[in-house]
Image: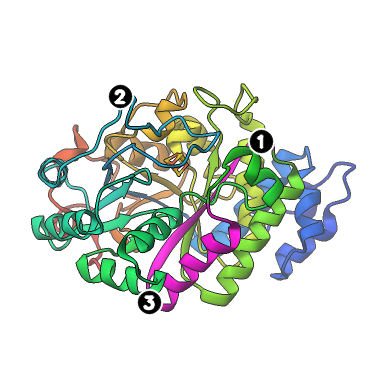
Amino acid sequence: MLFPRPVDVFNGPEGLQDVRDKVVAGERLTPEDGLRLFQSRDLNGLGTLADFANRRRNGRRASYILNRYINYSNYCILSCQFCAFSRKKRDNDGFQLTEEQMVAKAREALAIGITELHIVGGLHPSLPFSYYTGFLRALKAVDPRLQLKCFTAVEILHLAWLARKSVRDTLIELKEAGLESLTGGGAEIFRKEVRSRIATGKESADEYLAVHDTWHALGGRSTCTMLYGHVELPEDRIDHLDQLRRQQDRSGGFTGFIPLPYQPDNNRIPVRHGPSGFDQLRTLAVSRLYLDNIDHITAYWVGMGLKMAQIALSHGADDVHGTIVEEHIFHMAGARSPQGTAERDLVRAIREAGRIPVQRNTFYEPVRIWDEADASAPSDPSYEGAPAAEASAGSPIPFALA
Ligand code: SF4
């Protein structure tokens, strides 16, 4: 691959050429390097370098997934200050779904081609452990090919407490019931001083990482996240990325990193705006450059909008997340994006950005690769497609589900 001529990147007064040279040589960046990148205003330089790092790893492919979110309940015993989603039993807009309601949502979504259910909720005050294993089994019975990506680390700790078991034994039992991947949610910002200002009572960074470590030791895979753009400093972001990078060195089970831009509405954080577009792109670029041991960086269109996510594909991101169908958590906090999107819009956005669209599964493995020569995006609605494992005929180049 040709690297852009040196005059094309970091040509300004900021003196980041040494960082560029390290990236080109494949050397690991230090926290000090990362901090300098976060302080940079040379977005074009950063984007070019992150794009180089991404293309060296992922080529011209950019992925999306056909998925559906299900929130089983918004009742929660905690009250994280940034959260606009949780409710107490006394509130009149709390909800909890029955197993039958969840199965109905799964069937509805299967009919439109999804390969993954992404399921999270609050820390419910009274539902028994059997509720969770029950819905996993019921959803797996709908279609065993459906991949179940469920629960944040703090939910796992809550379920372990409910089950009166160790985290390891709890994860084993959930895995036997059908759990295939943990979600990356709940990481927020690891540094204690920030964490206590935005998520009092939530698990510590060590506990978050220990849950993922245990899951990885069991052969599981998960994603990881960072909620940014509120009260944290660049130093806190680098500390967060550094802790994730060290965890990945230890356990190697993170498939992708998803930076989550803070949403400012209906919460108790005294910051009334989310991160700027500049900051969102810079954060994605620095993440790509710093996390040299995580393969994929997702531009989360729900938080940044699909137009920004599209631009992010040339600033280090190689994934735009999925169809989602029904998003609540970001929208209750003020996200202006639609609650779900069509496959055709994801494919078009990727293709227009000069990348090859790839439908992926939960583990970022290709399900189908849209041939460059094939100009046709999926028909409207994209959801009309067959389940991915059956959709190998036709113009997309078929790839088997692993
Ligand atoms: S972020 Fe999660 S744990 Fe915290 S209050 Fe909201 S639902 Fe509960």
Residue type at mark 3?
A: Gly
The amino acid on which the numbered mark 2 sits, given as a three-letter code, is Asp
Residue 230 belongs to magenta span: yes
Label 1, on which residue?
A: 279
| Colour scheme in use | rainbow
Callout 2 environment at 10 Å: few (<14), some (14 to 19), or many (20+)?
few
Quadrant in the picture for the C terminus: bottom left
Q: Position of residue 211 (x, y in %)?
A: 47, 66
The answer to whether 302 is drawn above or below residue 387 in the figure is above
- Classify mark 1: helix, strand or loop: helix
Describe residue 392's horizontal placement relative to residue 204 as left or right: left
The residue shown at (44%, 37%) is 301
Q: Is residue 346 magenta?
A: no
- The one nearer the camera, 277 or 372, is 277
The residue identified by callout 3 is 219
Q: Residue 99's mark? A: none
Q: Residue 143 occupies which quadrant of the picture? A: bottom left
Q: Which of label 2 and label 1 is nearer to you?
A: 2
Could you tell me which secondary element the residue under label 2 belongs to?
A: loop
Name the residue at 33% across, 59% down: 162
Q: Which mark is residue 93?
A: 2
Q: Position of residue 2 (x, y in %)?
A: 64, 61
Q: Quadrant of residue 328?
A: top left
Tell me where the magenta segment starts and ends, as one range. 203-231
Circle 1 packing at 10 Å, graded few (<14), some (14-19), many (20+), is some
* Of callouts 3 and 2, the N-terminal one: 2
Contact, CB < 8 Å: mark 2 with mark 1?
no
